[in-house]
Image: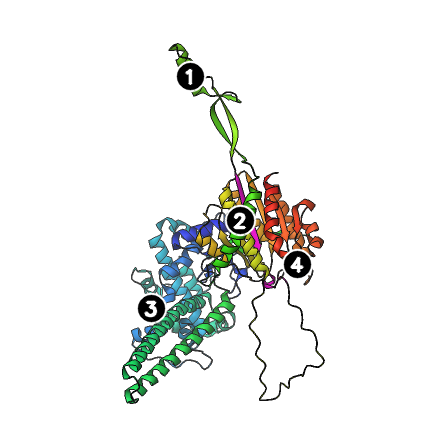
């Protein structure tokens, strides 16, 4: 047996190398939209779902499953369009079943609904398409043919030996062509180079009567749910709808601009029939555009519910979680998504620049006390721990030549540069959207007249616009920018990250700046675009930040976690509302980082933070800030203390 968790990262790299973009490798248990099959795979646009373990001696079976799933993309299975196929086949659009939703169902669902037993049609299509994909894999990846044959041999061991049509077809899919002699010639049409998904659909129509009999009626119960292929097709169709929506919006804008030009040219002339026709056309185009926009939103919501929220720019990682109740690790329990912060066009960068100018001088003066820490060998010195052999040879040559030799014949290691990498981990939970100083409730005035809200003529009095209060996230962003500008001058390597998420399978890790990046306008916009998100699952975020620090390679590594409260997330412990589980997992993550040589420190703006931080961190490794405005100065002092240890 081989477990997916042992090779998940290498499979993701394998898939990325073939597909040209990152694809998440997940287990069937992480996806509710696809029925679990211990020996099969499925996929969505961003992920491939594989069995948690396979009865195989090596990873070759997993490689075959990944190649098969990528083959569906390469062979354009999901480009099937029902209306186009009807036109290709020269047949009218059949009447769909009453329960069918033309605007919501996939094109494959529409196709299967035209058969007496859609479940039989669905299963038959998937098996026929697998024959076409296997043939493609053999042609495109000859090095994998041996692995594919071994995998088919493994599958044949679990096949029934009956003469039922589906059992015979399963044997053909796994390489036993002699068990499906009656339709073997028709099936070979799927294995030629020119075979397309339409070829599979045509063969489905031809072979369906051969498979539709009483024994297969039971498939209606076991195969009634929408397959992963249909969800993939709906995702591909959604992209087409988005393109259509953009095109309709452009056309509508062009008509509106043309109408405005005509109005200027007429300059007050009476409206004629042509103008009314233009307005009617404009109204019709708006209706079509709005209808398509609603359809796109409904489809996006359905896909989000079935296959999860899209994360097209994220890479995923798995981390353990410490279960302090059972005193053991939950292996690879958390899935963390790392993605770049997308700069927002309306981010207030100028306000942050003012903060930098206000604080940078003070922060730089405090950081100027830090001395170089890195060691570098200096040659040709008067005293040292080693001889400089080149200098010795030169001195001997000078003596033989009768020249006074240079007495600087030693070398030593001097501290000439800083070798530090720091990671700042910022809590982006929803609570950071709270104001620093909540407004005081208005005093009750007994003489104030209570308005009659049922009065149809009642109008509330106009209130003057109020300035947006300063929030926790504002001060966090400002503190990070001040530290970034000062550390950039100092020359230290540092990264800035945010974290949030919801649940153990969706921990979000946002990258504003990597250690090897320069501090430029893009990073400035990234920090300015940090926004409150969802919950606070600290353990996986700390473990991921520690992994980044170790890979950076500097001799001194520092991790500073900036939060506004205790760890809290959905399912972060068996008892809802009990935060001890999250506190203990975070404490274990910090201890793991410390054991790897990382200097850790936690800063919170939660005034009750002493209650849980003393259980999470040693006494000298956390700080509770009473006033948010003290955060930039506190960060500077903490960083100075850690780097002078």
Image vertical order of residue 147 relative to residue 98, above or below: above
> How many circles with numbers are drawn on the protein?
4
Mark 4 lies on a secondary structure that is loop
Crowd class of label 4 (few under 14; some 14 to 19; many from 20; radius 10 Å):
some
Residue on which disc 3 sits: 198
Cα gap from disc 1 to disc 4, whole angstroms: 69 Å
> Which residues are drawn in magenta?
419-437
State which mark lies toward you, 4 or 2: 2
Pick whichever of labels 4 and 3 is earlier in the sequence.
3
State which mark lies toward you, 1 or 2: 2
Mark 1 lies on a secondary structure that is helix
Residue on which disc 4 sits: 573
State which mark lies toward you, 1 or 3: 1
Residue 197: image location, x then y, percent: 35, 66
Q: How is the image coloured?
A: rainbow
Q: Which mark is residue 393?
A: 1
Cα gap from disc 4 to disc 3, whole angstroms: 50 Å
Instruction: Judge by depth and name the residue closer to the eye, 187 or 183.
Output: 187
Cα gap from disc 1 to disc 2, whole angstroms: 50 Å
Q: Which mark is residue 360?
A: 2
Instruction: Judge by depth and name the residue closer to the eye, 211 or 74.
Output: 74
Crowd class of label 2 (few under 14; some 14 to 19; many from 20; radius 10 Å):
some
Where is the C terminus found, in terms of image quarters?
top right
Pick whichever of labels 1 and 4 is earlier in the sequence.
1
Residue 14: image location, x then y, percent: 43, 50
Cα gap from disc 1 to disc 3, whole angstroms: 80 Å
């Amino acid at each position: 047996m081989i477990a997916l968790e042992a090779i998940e990262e290498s499979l993701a790299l394998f898939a990325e190398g073939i597909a040209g973009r990152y694809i998440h490798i997940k287990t069937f248990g992480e996806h509710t939209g696809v029925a679990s099959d211990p020996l099969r795979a499925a996929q969505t646009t961003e992920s491939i779902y594989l069995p948690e373990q396979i009865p195989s001696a090596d990873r070759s079976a997993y490689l075959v499953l990944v190649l098969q799933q990528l083959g569906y993309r390469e062979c354009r299975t999901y480009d099937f369009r029902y209306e186009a196929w009807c036109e290709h086949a020269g047949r009218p659009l059949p009447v769909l079943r009453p329960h069918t939703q033309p605007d919501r169902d996939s094109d494959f669902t529409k196709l299967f609904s035209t058969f007496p037993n859609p479940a039989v049609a669905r299963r038959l299509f998937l098996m026929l398409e697998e024959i076409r994909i296997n043939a493609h894999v053999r042609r495109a990846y000859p090095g994998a043919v041996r692995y594919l044959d071994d995998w088919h041999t493994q599958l044949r061991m679990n096949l029934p030996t009956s003469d039922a049509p589906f059992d015979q077809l399963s044997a053909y899919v796994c390489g036993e062509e002699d068990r499906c002699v009656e339709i073997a010639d028709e099936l070979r049409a799927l294995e030629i180079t020119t075979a397309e998904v339409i070829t599979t659909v045509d063969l489905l129509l031809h072979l369906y009567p051969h498979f539709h009999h009483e024994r297969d009626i039971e498939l209606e119960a076991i195969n009634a749910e929408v397959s992963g292929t249909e969800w993939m097709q709906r995702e591909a169709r959604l992209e087409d709808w988005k393109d259509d929506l953009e095109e309709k919006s452009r056309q509508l804008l062009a008509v509106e601009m043309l109408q405005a030009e005509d109005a200027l040219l007429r300059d007050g002339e009476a409206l004629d029939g042509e103008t009314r026709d233009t307005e009617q056309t404009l109204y019709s185009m708006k209706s079509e555009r709005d209808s398509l926009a609603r359809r796109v939103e409904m489809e996006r919501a359905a896909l989000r519910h079935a296959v999860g929220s899209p994360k097209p720019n994220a890479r995923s990682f798995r981390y353990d979680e410490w279960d302090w109740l059972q005193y053991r690790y939950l292996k690879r329990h958390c899935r963390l998504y790392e993605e770049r912060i997308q700069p927002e066009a309306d981010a207030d960068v100028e306000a942050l620049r003012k903060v930098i100018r206000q604080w940078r001088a003070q922060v730089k003066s405090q950081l100027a006390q830090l001395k170089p820490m890195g060691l570098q060998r200096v040659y040709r010195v008067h005293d040292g721990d080693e001889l400089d052999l080149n200098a010795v040879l030169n001195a001997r040559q000078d003596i033989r030549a009768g020249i006074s030799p240079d007495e600087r014949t030693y070398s030593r290691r001097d501290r000439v540069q800083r070798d530090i990498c720091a990671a700042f981990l910022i809590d982006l939970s929803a609570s950071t959207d709270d104001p620093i100083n909540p407004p005081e409730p208005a005093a009750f005035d007994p003489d104030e007249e209570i308005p009659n809200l049922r009065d149809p003529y009642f109008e509330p009095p106009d209130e003057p616009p109020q300035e947006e209060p300063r929030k926790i996230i504002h001060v966090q962003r400002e503190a990070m920018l001040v530290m970034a500008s000062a550390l950039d001058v100092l020359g230290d390597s540092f990264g800035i990250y945010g974290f949030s998420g919801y649940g153990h399978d969706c921990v979000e890790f946002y990258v504003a700046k990597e250690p090897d990046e320069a501090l430029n306008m893009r990073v400035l916009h990234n920090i300015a675009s940090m926004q409150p998100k969802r919950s606070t699952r600290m353990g996986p975020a700390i473990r991921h930040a520690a992994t980044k620090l170790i890979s950076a390679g500097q001799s001194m590594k520092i991790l500073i976690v900036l939060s506004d409260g205790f760890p809290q997330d959905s399912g972060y412990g068996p008892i809802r509302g009990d935060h001890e589980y999250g506190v203990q997992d975070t404490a274990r993550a910090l201890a793991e980082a410390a054991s790897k040589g990382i200097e850790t420190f936690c800063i919170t703006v939660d005034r009750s933070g002493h209650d849980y931080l003393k259980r999470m961190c040693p006494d000298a490794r956390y700080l509770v800030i009473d006033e948010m405005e003290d955060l930039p100065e506190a960060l500077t002092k903490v960083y100075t203390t850690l780097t002078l240890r």
